[in-house]
Image (tube, grey):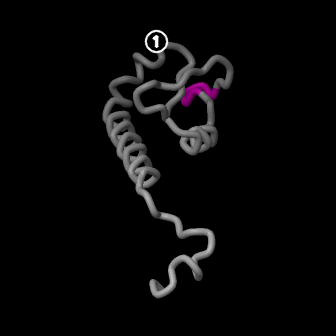
Amino acid sequence: MNADVGKLNSLVARVYKLCHNKDGVFRYSACQAVYYYRRDYQTKDRADHKTPCKVIKKARLRYELEEKKLRDTPGDFPTENIFKDNVGYF
């Protein structure tokens, strides 16, 4: 995961959604969008969380793949002196 995604993740409230406890919470590893206070709470919530978890996980993977493609594409940014180096292209 890149630094930009890490910055986005820091905006997510690190609070367990049922009791709003902030201490000792952990992020669900599959979707990385929901926090739980204890493993048994995660197990209890699994049936309700299963469908959105899959959607979020797929979206996150698509985002990371598209970001990698964009970052790996050469020539996205013009040269430092665009008027000298690209005469006739604008």
Q: Quadrant of residue 4?
A: top right
Residue 79: image location, x then y, percent: 56, 69
Residue 65: percent from left, percent from top: 37, 45
Q: Left or right of 14: which side holds 77?
A: left
Residue shown at the point (42%, 32%) measured from the top left: 31
Residue 51: % across, % down: 31, 35
Residue 76 belongs to the span the image colors magenta: no
Question: Residue type at mark 1?
Answer: Asp
In the picture, residue 54 is in which quadrant?
top left
Residue located at (47% from left, 25% from top): 28
Residue located 41% across and 41% down the image: 60
Which is nearer the eye, 11 or 37? Answer: 11
Is residue 73 placed above or below 62 in the rendered structure? below
Q: Nearer the viewer, residue 23 or 4?
A: 4
Q: Is residue 12 visible?
A: no
Residue 89 place in picture, x, y as percent: 45, 84
Q: Which range of residues does the magenta coloring cover?
A: 16-20
**57 and 63: which is toward the camera:** 63
Q: Which residue is mark 1?
A: 40
Q: Is residue 53 above or below residue 86?
A: above
